[in-house]
Amino acid sequence: MARFILRRLFHAVLTFVGATLIVYALMFSIASDPLQALAGERPLSESQRAQLTAQYRLDEPFLVQYGYYMKGLLTGDMGRTITGRPIADVLAEAWPRTIRLAVIAMGIVIVFGVIGGVFAGLRRGGAFDQTSLALTLVVIGTPVFVLGTVFQTVFAVELGWFRPSFAPELGLATYVLPAIVLGMLSLATTMRLTRTSVVENLRADYVRTANAKGLTWRRVVSVHVLRNSLIPVLTFLGTEFGALMSGAMVTEGIFNIPGVGGRLFQGIRLEDGPLVVTIVSLLILIYLVVNLIVDLLYAVLDPRIRHE
Amino acid sequence: MRSGSWFACWLLIPAALGLAACGGSPAPASGELVVSIGIGEPKSLIPSRANESNAADVLEALFTKLVDYDAQQRPVELAAESITSDDNRVWTIRLRPDWTFHNGEPVTADSYINAWNAGAWGPNAHEANYFFEKIEGYADLNPVDASKPPAARKLSGLRKVDELTFEVTLNAPYVNFKSMLGYTAFYPLPLAAFEDVDNNVISPRYQEAPIGQGPFRMQGSWQHDQLIEMVRYEDYAGPVKPKVAGLAFKIYQQQTTQYQDLLAGQLDIQSQIPLENVGSAAADLGERFKQSPSSTIQFLAFPTFDPSFSKPEIRRAISMAIDRDEIINALFLRSQLPLRSFVSPIVPGYREDICGDACQFNPAAAKALFESAGGAAAVGGRIEIAYNVDGGHKPWVDATCNQIRTNLGVPCVGNPQPKFSELLTKVRAKEPVGLFRLGWIFDYPAIENYLGPVYTTTGSSNYYGYSNPEFDRLVAAGDAAATPEEALVYYQQAEDILVQDMPVVPLRYSQNNFGHSTRVKNVELDLFSRVKYLQLEASAP
């Protein structure tokens, strides 16, 4: 087990370095003129152009720029954004918000998705199953920004149940509406997946055996069916957590949450290589860690799976 | 609009002031309320770095300009007692006595001299650096080769006369210098802003809580991407005092979210209602939706390196083939208005319809002129219009192309570029991008602030390479004129040349489309699209 974890962590380091290189190369290739991007439609004086080029080493070749970036990163200096703020400060403010949003969204997905899915699966063809099928199909087919704007208009502006935008003084409550929107798509998929998995497992031999042994229905479902049904769902949720974080960009924009998504968007717009690379690399790291946790959880759910 | 009032109450309690405005207490007066205003995240809050509207909006509340503008857009002294010059080259600026910064430091001639030196200091690379280029000694502070240190540390053209008086010497006489002093870059800085005043180093912490001499002072520091809070500065020396307790600039990523907050009563003022919401704003907000003129103009530029557009007849025919009114009515819902001049209608010296027939929609004449000048073959078989896709320009560019195609019988397509900077890079490299879109918002209300930067050969925003020596001469003659009235004669002659040459196709000028909540009144925007903070009043709903 320890060897397994170590090996995976080693992979994570390699992936991290590779990812930064690729993302840095991509940013480098799309950057036409970051200084003009910063100035917007305003002119830029010659001396200013010369100063900033030297300051951000924009005239150096790609590998040299990347070398400086990695050197800074390894010595704990993430550098500055092109507007002059320390990237470490920007991330320290933005990450907690995005993580809170994603975790609450994940909580909503797990609670409602799994419970709803099990319920639909147990009463296959019932009214709940049919309605939820129709609803989840609608949700899966709706783009997030449409869903976000509609929810914002209906629940915040018209009904006044929530605030239309981020309000830090409300604490975690301010994340609820955005988290519902963000989690909606995953929720729909989780529900479909859980339902199918439960339906399949209900027909499995071991369920017939368990029933024949005279176990109560409740025990058969909660211990035998559920445990086996959750493995594909867990795989999905593992990958989905990363998607929730990166997918938060649109939701954060609509609800004005000053999280990582907004910074990433701004970084891409201003061709701010170091900022984008740092954010994307951290996203990749989180993705790797979450998937490591998922792999470890497999063993808990199914003792036959061993990581040796 | 909303049932539960406790939510709305949150906004009324300026947390920083700790006023118990909610519950059974009597309704607070205007002077006890904080007004919230929506903006985007500023890039920097150092005055000489503030070259975009978000930062300028915030700084306008923290600082007071040397000059304000009257109804005719003429500069009148505000923080200055007098600004005089005999020859328009050496200007004497006398400050009003007894002004203080928010930290108690007195405002002196040095406050201005230090700030301007720091703004002009090349190694600082401040965005508004080019505003100081007219001051003597600028070149010494701004070597084009960044590896060499500047030849001087201070602008030789700034000289302190006494505590409240200083003299500014320009490279050449400039009649609009007094107007120019109303720009954000010319605010003073307290000594507390500097880490090393002799070497023009501004402390990196300064912009997190800027100290100014204006009507409002910072409450806490800049909460990036969220909020900038201010309270009334009780020792403010200006003639008009604020009528509200403070301002809260709420920072938004999207203007559509701002609008939702405005509808939900969570935001008091939105100074730019986006095009998506302009259509429904009158119905949503009623009398609280307002429009007023602003200074932005939009036009299409002809790249001079492209032989397709070298003939003025071709340029004129394209201009005549565009039905400005139709596009404005259908796409912009009259949130912008047609422009038939080369400057904005709000500057002194603007003449309506100066462009004449060339800007009037006339498909038959356009077609005839186009054919006589060589027709489709002369423009290489087709016309392209380049634009940046991140600015929402696609719909009107496509519509314009459709009109050109229909009316001139030549294929026309939009040429989308990811960003404005990429468009400029291609134009600089003289790649054939076709016509391209440009916009211009003024820095100070002078006709020269359009003619100089946009159309002169060395103009900082003349990206399309138009050059006419006679035009340059007339603008320079205007700059050097003895009085603004005399200058105007030259400037208008210069604009007449643009009518002949048609280096650009004037299209539209913008309006401020803004809205406010029921809590505030006297909401007006100035020509810079900035809320007039000092006249704002608030009342509990």
Image (cartoon, coloured by chain):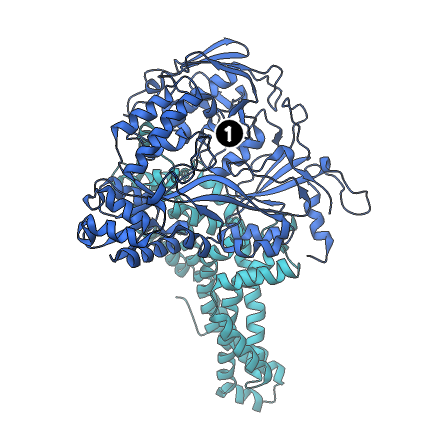
Q: Position of residue B104 (x, y in %)?
A: 62, 20
Answer few, some or many: residues within 10 Å of disc 1's Cα (few below 14, many 20 plus, some between 14 and 19).
some
Q: Amino acid at mark 1?
A: Gln
Taking A38 as reference, is A97 above or below it? below
Name the tint of chain A in the rendering. Answer: cyan
Quadrant for the N terminus of chain B, please: bottom right
Name the tint of chain B in the rendering. Answer: blue
Residue at which label 1 appears: B73
Mark 1 chain: B
Asked if residue B540 lies left or right of residue B433, the reply is: right
Asked if residue B408 lies left or right of residue B374, the reply is: right
- Residue at 60%, 51% in the rendered image: B261
- Residue at 46%, 41% in the rendered image: A88
Q: Position of residue B328 (x, y in %)?
A: 44, 52
Report whether residue B276 is seen. Answer: yes
- Residue at 32%, 16% in the rendered image: B151
